[in-house]
Amino acid sequence: MNPMPTPPDDTIHAVAKTEVMRAFLRGRFVVFDGPDGCGKSTQFRRFADWANAQGVTVTEVREPGGTEIGEQIREILLDPSNELMTIRAEMLLYMASRAQLLEERIRPALVRGELILADRFVSSTLAYQGTAGGMTRDEILDVARVAIGDMWPDDIVIFDVDTATAAKRMNPELDRMEQKGAEFHERVRQGYLQQCREDPARYVTIDARQNPETVFARLVEAFIARMKAGIAPRVRG
C-alpha cells in the first residue's frame, strides 16, 4: 500500500496557526468601540466572518440593545425627541441595558466557550458620558461594577478616526447621540485615546482613517500579535 502523501510544510504550518488562533479566540470577550463614524460596524462584520472561518463560534451583541429589554432601552436612548435626558439618566440606562445583555447573552456564551464580539461596552460610557459628558471615571466604574461584576472584556479595540472624517461617514439621519456636535465628538475621541494610554495591555488602537481593507488587515495583525504574546482571557468568577 502506498503511504499517504505528506502535506507540504506551509500547509502544516497554516493548519497549526489556525488551530492556535482558534484556541486563542474561544471563550474570549472582545469589544469593538470608537467614535460614531469610525467604521467599526464594517470591521465588526468582517471580523465575525473571519473568526467563523477559523472554526470559532461567535456570539455577536450590540449596545445598547441585544435583548428584548435592551432594545426597548435603545429606543429611549437614541430617540432625538428625548433632548431633556440628563447625562446621569443616560448613563444609568446604558448600564441597565448592559446588565441585561450580560446575564442573558454574554455570560452563557462565554460558559459555552464561544467568542463574544460586542459592538460597544463600558468603554463607550467612559468616553461619551465620562470624558465628553462630564461624569467622573469613578462614578461610572462604581455603577459598572454593579452592572457587570467581574465580566470585563479581554480585548477592547478602539477604531480611531479624526472628527472631520467621522462626520463625513455618518448617516445623514442622525440619532440623538450623533446630533451632539463636533466639539462633543472630539471630546469623545480624546476619551477613547486616554483609555488606550491608561490600559495599553487590554486596549488595541487601530487607525481607522484608512480604507476598510487596510484597517481589517491591521486588525487581524493586532490579534495575531496578541496571540503570539500569549495574552490569555481574564479569570472570571
Image (tube, rainbow, N blue to C red):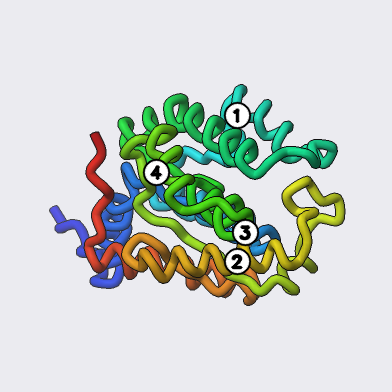
Specify whether 91 is left or right of 183: left
- In this view, the mark in front (3 or 2): 3
Circle on res. 70? 1
Q: CA distance from mark 4 to mark 3?
A: 30 Å
Dot 1: element:
helix
Task: Please tell me whether mark 4 or mark 2 is closer to you in this view.
Answer: 2
Q: In the rendered structure, which amino acid carries the disc numbered 2?
A: Arg
Please name the residue that numbered disc 4 is placed on: 115
Q: Give the residue displayed 20% in from the left and 64% down from the top.
A: 6
Cα gap from disc 1 to disc 2, whole angstroms: 25 Å
What's the amino acid at mark 3?
Answer: Ala
Q: Which residue is mark 3?
A: 132
Q: CA distance from mark 1 to mark 4?
A: 21 Å
Q: Nearer the viewer, residue 5 or 113?
A: 113
Mark found first going from the N terminus, 1 or 2: 1
Q: Residue at x 50, y 46 (%)?
A: 121
Residue at position x 63%, y 36% in the image = 89
Q: Is residue 209 above or below residue 143?
A: below
Q: Give the camera-side residue of 18 and 115.
A: 115
Q: CA distance from mark 4 to mark 2?
A: 27 Å
Q: Say whether disc 3 or disc 2 marks the residue closer to the N-terminus.
A: 3
What is the count of numbered marks?
Answer: 4
Q: Secondary structure at mark 4?
A: strand
Amino acid type assigned to the residue bearing label 4 in the image: Leu
